[in-house]
Image (tube, helix red, strand yellow):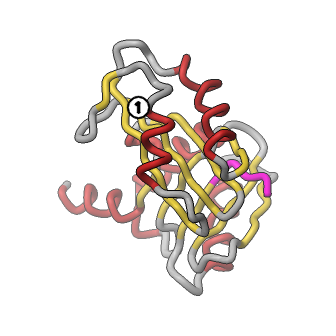
Amino acid sequence: MDFNLIITTQRGNETRCAKEVMVLAKSLDVEDIDFVRTRFPGLLVAKLIGDPLEFVRRAKMVMEKDPWAFKYIQRLVPVQKVCQTEISAMKEVVKELVDKIPQQSSFKVVVSKRGSTLRRDDIIRELAALIDRRVDLERPEVLLQVEIIDENTGISLLSEDDIVSLTKLQERALEG
C-alpha cells in the first residue's frame, strides 16, 4: 500500500469523506488523488501527486475559513515516508530524516498503531534513541509522527500545526 496522506472520519462515512477530500483537493488544484479504504472503520489512506505536507497546510487554510462546511473529514495527516511495519525498517527511515531536525529543536515521538503487535513503548524507545535532540513531551518543536496501519508504516517530521484536526479548528473558531 503506497500512501502519503491519512484521513480519519466517523465510522460508516468513509465514502462521503473521500468525496469531501476530493472536492477540497480540486479546490486546491490537486487533480490526482487516489483513496484506499483500510480494514479499520473511519480510516482512509490516499496517494496524491505533490507534497502531502504542502497539501495539508493549504487544506488547513481553506478549512479554517469555515470549519463547519466540512462534515466528514476529522483529521488529515501528511506522510513523508512509508516502510514496512518492522522496527528495523522504521529505524532506517528515521536515520534518513533525522538531519532535517534542527540541532536546537526539541522533539517527541508520536505513535498511532492499528493492526500491529509491536509495543508502542518499544517503538518510541528505539526511534528516539536515533535522534540526538532534546525531548519535550509537552511542547515539542518537531513531532516524529509514526502511523502504523497493519504491515505499512507512515513516518513524518511535523509540527503540531501540520496535522489538521477539524475539532480543533472548530474550537478555535468558537473562541473567536
Question: Magenta span has 138?
Answer: no
Q: Single out the residue that lies furthest toward the bottom.
A: 12
- Is residue 67 toward the left or the right of residue 140 in the image? right
x and y percent of residue 173 in the render?
27, 58
Type of amino acid at the residue the image marks with label 1: Val
> 115 or 159: which is nearer to us?
115
Q: Is residue 91 above or below residue 71?
A: above
Circle 1 packing at 10 Å, graded few (<14), some (14-19), many (20+), is many
* The N terminus, quarter of image: bottom right
x and y percent of residue 39 in the render?
68, 77
The residue positioned 46% from the left and 48% from the top of the image is 122
x and y percent of residue 154 in the render?
63, 48
The residue positioned 40% from the left and 31% from the top of the image is 142
Task: Please give the range of residues in magenta.
Answer: 1-5
x and y percent of residue 2 in the render?
78, 52
Residue 159 sits in which quadrant? top left
Helix or strand or loop: what does disc 1 sit on? strand
The residue under label 1 is 142
Q: Single out the residue that lies furthest toward the top.
A: 103
The residue positioned 26% from the left and 62% from the top of the image is 171
Q: Is residue 169 above or below residue 86?
A: below
- Residue 165 seen by the camera: yes
Q: Is residue 76 above or below residue 106?
A: below
The residue positioned 63% from the left and 78% from the top of the image is 14
> 34 or 26: which is nearer to us?
34
- Residue 61 seen by the camera: no
